[in-house]
Amino acid sequence: MMLSCKAATRLASAAQDRKLTVSEQIQLRLHLAICNGCRNFTRQIGLIRSAGRRLADHLDDEN
């Protein structure tokens, strides 16, 4: 059964904090292969996470 967008975005968010199980990874990849909106969401949360890390590193360097 294909993941809903709600389930896919939850998994994409969870992947930022933990390693997904093989089953979760496969389900998410299958969903992302057909859903442009969820691909964009996944890309955006990755960019937000990366920007947050760069900001934190920059602030640490200042202190």
Image (spheres, rainbow, N blue to C red):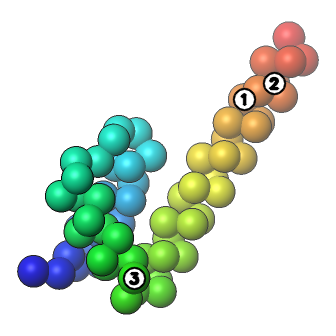
Residue 40 lies left or right of residue 52; in this view the side is: left
Residue 12 spot, x, y in % from top left: 38, 59
Q: Is residue 26 left or right of residue 9?
A: left
| Residue placed under numbered mark 3 in the picture | 33
- Which quadrant is the C terminus positioned in? top right
Verify CB contact (< 8 Å) between mark 3 and mark 2: no
Q: Amino acid at mark 3?
A: Ala
Secondary structure found at label 1: helix
Residue 34 placement (x, y as % from top left): 37, 88
CB of mark 1 within 8 Å of CB of mark 2? yes
| Amino acid type of the residue tagged 1 in the rendering | Ala
Nearer to us of marks 3 and 2 is: 3
- Amino acid, disc 2: Leu
Q: Position of residue 5 (x, y in %)?
A: 29, 78
How crowded pointer 3 is (Cα within 10 Å; few <14, some 14-19, many 20+) is rated as few
Q: Which residue is mark 2?
A: 59
- Name the disc covering residue 27, or none: none
Observer-nearest residue: 50 or 1? 1
Is 60 drawn above or below residue 43 in the view shown?
Answer: above
Is disc 3 placed on a helix, strand or loop? helix
Residue 39 drawn above or below residue 50: below
Q: CA distance from mark 3 to mark 1?
A: 33 Å
> Disc number at residue 56?
1
Residue at 44% across, 46% down: 16
- Placement of the N terminus among the 4 image quadrants: bottom left
Residue found at x 54% / y 58% = 45
